[in-house]
Amino acid sequence: MRLGTKLTLYLSLIIILVLAGYGYLDILSRRDILLRKMKAEVRSTGRTLEISLEKILLPGEIGHVQGLIKAMSEEQRNLGIIIYYPVGNRIFRSPSLEKGFEPYLDLIKRSMQEGRPQEEFMTYNQVPVFSYSFPLQDSSGKNIGGVSILQNTSFMEKEIEKAKSSIFITIVMLIGGTVALVLWGARKWVTRPISKLMDGTKQLAEGHLDHQIDLRRGDELSELAQAFNQMAVDLEKARKRIIGEAEAKLELERSLRQSEKLATIGQLASELAHEIGTPLNIIYGRTDLILRKLEDKEELQKNLDIILHQTERITRIIQQLLGFVRKKKPEHAPMNTGTLLETTLDLLDHQIQKQQVRVVKDWEDNLPPVIGDPDQLQQVFLNLILNAIQSMPQGGRLGLSVSSKRISKEGLKQEARPYIEIAVQDTGMGMEREVRQKIFTPFFTTKGTGTGLGLMVSEGIVRDHEGWIEVESEVGKGSVFKVYLPSAPKEVKNERNQPENPGGR
């Protein structure tokens, strides 16, 4: 329920209660006035009768009593009159009072005994009446009789009912007019301004920070609108500042990752020079043989094939190296993790052979692709595989596996979802617990020539891809790094075909 509606209902309820209370009190006041008026009329009638009847002392004059009663009974409001004389136990009454008037005789007698008038609200034949009884006295103050006037109170009740109807109509009109006025005021001064504030809040939530609320009325809601507008301006400034800082941070991270990539290339430079030097020597030797045996066409064709093969090998190595070193903008595309691992192994082929490392590869068939940046993820795999090779200076076994799993990451409030697990396992020296807890810390390294940024950068790249890295290691038995990356939906196809399970290397 809207605030304006609540305010209207609340004020309307108060108004209704106040006006209803006023009407009730007004009815009580009118009843009291009518009652006083009726009593005053009855007393006036009684006073008139008292003066007339106290002069009728002789028996011959008593005949005039009945005529007086008849004349007084013609008043519509008078139900009847009873006159009682104890001498002779004479009772005079109006024709309308045929029977059942004994209680009123008791009131007359009681007023004569107490020497003062008696007033009672009673009923006569189920008709509500007001009884006014008073004693009659002679000139010496002796009681000679008594009178009871029965006033019909239904006339008063009718007037009260008319007053109730009039008051009810007046109150209803007042309530209707007041509620309409309150409703109009609530809509104008409360509902509409609040609606503007709510619309401004919605616009702000949708990112429209340039939206301004126009409320110029000089009240609290106007002050709130001004504060809201100022908040929107401040948020716009803060958003621009945050965007600028975020862009600077991203650029710094890209530069850091590129620097780490160049540092890795620095470690590979000497090995790659030897890798390229070997086919160059072969090309040189075969070219010399060609010059010596130009007449031998079969030998010439053989040497030319060897030269072509070694030249392609040099070109492939250089392209892989340049593709890895080249600084590119991050991109997200479906890719095959197995193919990416194969390309990474090609870069490290010389180190693998030099240190007599045996590579065992195992990945499932029909693996779903991963959405990510191939260049960044290759940097991750290059760091992990190079670290594994360097941890086995005397040779050993390098295990690479790729599999699909459904995992619910601990600490994330979500159901299990499909992930690709890439495991890099070595049989090297392993790590102690203290070292394992610090390996992702910037500038922490156990190598004499390392930068201490490789694993930190790798962990950041994987985190950017909504994944994570887990490490298991035991001193003397080796280590295993497991990279978890969310897999793409089934309808997304791999960038390249899934390679067959390559077995050992």
Image (cartoon, rainbow, N blue to C red):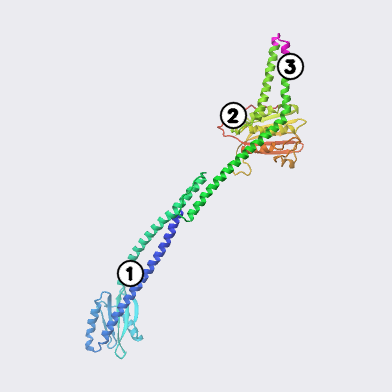
Write the start and end of the magenta stretch as one range: 289-298
Residue 293 belongs to magenta span = yes
Farthest residue to the right: give it: 394
Residue 395 belongs to magenta span = no
> Going 72% across and 29% down the picture, which residue do you hit?
268
Farthest residue to the bottom: give it: 140
Q: Does residue 300 appear anywhere in the picture?
A: yes
Q: Residues within 10 Å of mark 3 (few under 14, many from 20)?
A: few
Residue to which mark 1 is pinned: 160
Residue to which mark 3 is pinned: 285
C-alpha gap between disc 1 and disc 3: 133 Å
The overriding secondary structure of the stretch rendered in magenta is helix
C-alpha gap between disc 3 and disc 2: 40 Å
Instruction: Work out which quarter of the rendered image holds the C terminus and state it.
Output: top right
Q: Is residue 111 left or right of residue 248?
A: left
> What amino acid is labelled 3 in the image?
Gly
In the rendered image, residue 447, in percent from the top left (x then y), is placed at 75, 36
